[in-house]
Image: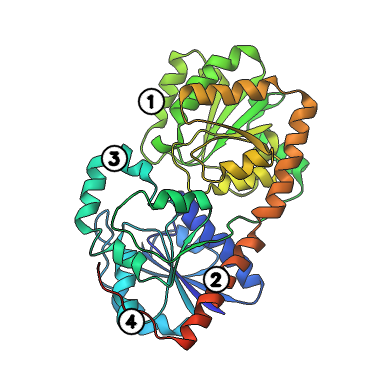
Amino acid sequence: MKLLHILSSVDPNGGGPTEGVRQRGIRLTELGHTVEVVSLDDAARPFLREFPLKVHALGPSKGSYRYNGKLVPWLTAHAREYDAVVINGMWQYHSFGAWRALQKLQMPYFVFTHGMLDPWFKRTYPFKHAKKWLYWPWADYRVLRDARAVLFTSEEELIQARKSFWLYRAKEQVIAYGTRTPPGDASALREMFLAAHPLLRGRRILLFLSRIHEKKGCDLLVRAFAKVASREPSLHLVVAGPDQTGWVASLQALAQEHGVADRISWPGMLRNEMKWGAFYSAEAFVLPSHQENFGIAVAEALGCGLPALISDKVNIWREVESNRAGLVAPDTLQGTETLLDQWLSLTSAERGAMGGAARELFMRRFTVDAMANGLLDVVRKYSARAVSAPYPRSTIV
């Protein structure tokens, strides 16, 4: 099968959507399929050389909406060369531009919303939400309405998506999601990471590894850590990830204000061996996010046998809680403090059992094989329907 993914950008700093396309694409290629990507990136961007899939970079693009006049002509000329087209993400031109081209071709396509319809955004950024309403009826509403299937990575994401806009219609499908099995040489990777960060050797490390962004609850984590740090002198927090909004300086000042600046490390974005070394050096993964569609990093942590201490706004929290693969609490200061308090109250045996449950949950639910096969199954299912019936051309209700 030959698949085409459409993304606004393949910049690794973009987080989950890019990583999901990357991981699934690698595995599908290993299984003998062809996976290519169209992005609105400037072809001169250095991260394109490191991306493992063939990328048709059509940029540079204009503004934060990333308008690009080359997208529709390119898709019009090439989309029929692929067995299926998958749009990843919303609210930028790549989704609406793809709809324009694919509707003209009467070619079926699929959409991953990647959590971008979560009502958290409506509550937190009401002005932005109001602006989205101005083009929702004629743009992204149509993108979802006319998709062969709109793909969600959990039942929770699907439920939340229905709450964002009253004008909503989609053929909804929950699909398996995950990531590659972590490398197995834990001792060597751990030693590599600790050699690069010698002050962490001998510490009980709690790891936050994600984008450093307001929605991730980093401020809650710093404050909660300050409240519990005195209980365990060897406890140390590592906050790793790209600083996309210039927030780190304020968070560091917050840590200084609460007297824990020397017990929090900020190594920036960790990749490849250093990322896995950080996972294997930690005793728990912490993510008190206000909104998290899936959380590739959560799955990676589980795959490393690392219990996940997460908020109930991470959409796979039910799976984590029901399988005793971590701890769950509200995305508040009290909730985050409760997560850390409960973790410190566990015995060594209880923490070990939770780590084993984390690994078992990963292998059962969140592997890249499940993710790759899930997409193939959906494409085959809806493509089979397309053979016997023309692609529906619906109108705005």
Q: Mark 2 and mark 4 in contact (Cβ < 8 Å)?
A: no
Q: How is the image coloured?
A: rainbow
Nearer the observer: mark 2 or 1; the answer is 2
Separation of marks 2 and 1 at Cα, in angstroms: 44 Å
Q: Earlier in the sequence, mark 1 or mark 4?
A: 4
The residue wearing badge 4 is: 76
The residue wearing badge 2 is: 378
> Residue at the bottom extreme?
388
Q: Earlier in the sequence, mark 2 or mark 3?
A: 3
Q: Quadrant of residue 216?
A: top left
Q: Which mark is residue 277?
A: none
Q: Residues within 10 Å of mark 1 (few under 14, many from 20)?
A: few
**Residue at the location (51% across, 25% down)?**
335
Q: Quadrant of residue 120?
A: top left
Separation of marks 4 and 3 at Cα, in angstroms: 35 Å
Q: Secondary structure at mark 3?
A: loop
The residue wearing badge 1 is: 250
Nearer the observer: mark 4 or 3; the answer is 3
Q: Secondary structure at mark 4?
A: helix
What amino acid is found at the position of numbered circle 2 in the picture? Val
The residue wearing badge 3 is: 125
Reply above or below: 378 against 345. below
Q: Position of residue 298 (x, y in %)?
A: 59, 44
> Residue at the right extreme?
349
Q: Position of residue 282 (x, y in %)?
A: 67, 33
**Residue at the location (46% across, 54% down)?**
158
Front-lying residue, 214 or 196: 214
